[in-house]
Every structure is written in structure tokens, then in C-alpha cells.
Image: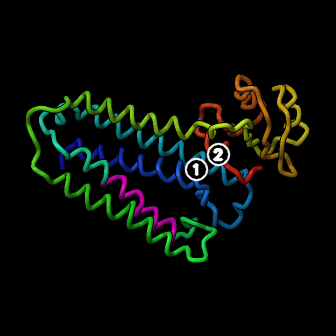
Amino acid sequence: MPKPARWGIVLGFALGGFFDGILLHQILQWHHLLSLVPGVDTLRAQVLWDGYFHALMYLVAAIGLWGLWRARGELQDRRGWGLPGALLIGFGAWHVIDGVLSHWLLGIHRIRLDSPDPLFWDLLWFTAFGLVPLVIGWWLLHRRPRRRGGLSGSAFVLLIGLATSGAALWSLQPPQGQQFTTIVFAPQVRPAEAMNALVAADARLVWSDPKMGVVVAKVPENRRLDFYRRGALLVGGSGVPGGCFNWSAAAV
């Protein structure tokens, strides 16, 4: 398999993770990464692990883009549908692995936790976003490549990089019209310290759990980063992989 195809599969895998996290964890809010794991039953823990998941996808995407950039010379010589096919293979592979490992073997979550028939949704997602992209991607990857015309290898990698960056940035943004920021404090931060952090940031408390481990507040946008200096682990809308927190309806 050509190097661009191998790195394309890596990048497609990350895009599959972005798709899963943005659509299912944030927009539809059907599950969190560890929704069914015993002992991980607080909002603090659930959104924290969602943040770790997104951070991992950023790393995988960066590795894939780095590999494609190094192999851009081969892209110049081998054009056609091979790279889009590789991206689809990686995208489908993410959903196949997630379905088999996360849904059925480990049981850490299901596609729709609120469904009376979760297996139906698991199989639907597995087929539509796993098997179908895999088959189409395999077919595209093995089509005869064109050797003239089209985008240069460097331009194509840059275009893919922009699209991937757009997906990553989208996952960091709070939903449109959202006025509030969700803050997750480290376990050692006491309620009084969390309240002092809110006061120091000129924030207005809207909601919190009993121990003030997870707090929803109205915070001036330019003061969100202040919470990291006062014991916050992740802050929604602050430009780090915790942006998904501000999509959670569970907090309010």
C-alpha cells in the first residue's frame, strides 16, 4: 500500500473520531465516551473523559497530516481517488472498531442510551458509518490512478489539513446562542476555592453539583482562561479540547 494511503487511513480514523464526538457527544448528546462504565457516574468524570478523547483525536489527526506532508511527493505522482478512498477506509475503520470494542466487547457505551432497542442503533451506525465507507473506500483506493492533471500533492494535503482543522475548531466551540461556560475543577479544589475562582473572574454562578466540582457560570469570554490558574481541569469554550463541555445539556 502506498505511503499516502497509509497516512490517509490514519487521518480518516481521526476524522471518524471527530464525527463521533461532535455529533453523538455534543450535538445529539446520545452518549458520553464512558456512559456505561461503573463508577464513572458524575458529570465531571464523563465530560473529562470526553475531553481526553478529543485531545487524542487531535494527536492522531496531527500524525496523519504529518505523514501525508512527508509523502506529498508520491501524491504528485499518484493522483486519482486513492487518497479519498484511504480517508473513507480510516473513517469506516473507526466506527467498526468503536462498534465492536466499545459497544459490544467492553460495553462502555451504546449509540443511543435512551432507546428501548440499543442494538438496532448500534447495528445501524455500524453499517451506515462503518461498513459502507469501508467498502466504498476500498473500491476507490484500488481504482487505476491518473498521472496527469489535478491538484499537486502539497495543495491536496493543505486542503485536507484545512478541512481537518475546521472539524477540530468546530469541536471547541460552544453551541450558537450559548451564554454559559461549563468548568470542571480538579478533585482537590474545595467548594470555597471554586467560589473564589468565580468571584475573581467576575462570573455569575448558574448551576453547580453539590461539591462544586462541575460549575456552569456566565463568564466574560476573556476571563475563561483564568480558571486554569485556579484549579480547573477543563473549561468549555476556552480554546482547548474541553470545548465540548459547553454542548452538554446535562449540566443545566
The residue wearing badge 2 is 247
Is the Cβ of the residue at disc 2 closer than 8 Å to that at disc 1?
yes
Point 60% across, 72% down: residue: 115
* Amino acid type shown at disc 1: Ile
Magenta segment, principal secondary structure?
helix
How far apart are the two marked residues, 2 and 1, measured between alpha carbons? 7 Å
Point 88% across, 42% down: residue: 191
In the displayed structure image, the side of residue 32 where residue 13 appears, left or right = left
* Amino acid type shown at disc 2: Trp
Colour option used? rainbow
Is residue 249 in the magenta section?
Answer: no
| Residue 231 occupies quadrant | top right
The mark nearer the N terminus, 2 or 1, is: 1
| Dot 2 alpha-carbon crowd within 10 angstroms: few under 14, some 14 to 19, many 20 or more | many
The residue wearing badge 1 is 27
* In the image, farthest residue toward the right: 192
Q: Nearer the viewer, residue 44 or 146?
A: 146
Is residue 98 in the magenta section?
Answer: yes
Point 49% across, 38% down: residue: 168
In the displayed structure image, the side of residue 197 where residue 170 appears, left or right = left
Secondary structure beneath dot 2 equals helix
Place of residue 12 in the rendered image (x, y in percent of width and height, measured from the top left): 35, 48
| Residue 194 occupies quadrant | top right
* In the image, farthest residue toward the front: 177
In the displayed structure image, the side of residue 177 where residue 205 appears, left or right = right
Q: Against 202, is 146 above or below?
A: below
Q: Which residues are magenta?
A: 89-105
Place of residue 235 in the rendered image (x, y in percent of width and height, measured from the top left): 69, 37
Place of residue 28 in the rendered image (x, y in percent of width and height, measured from the top left): 58, 55
Secondary structure beneath dot 1 equals helix
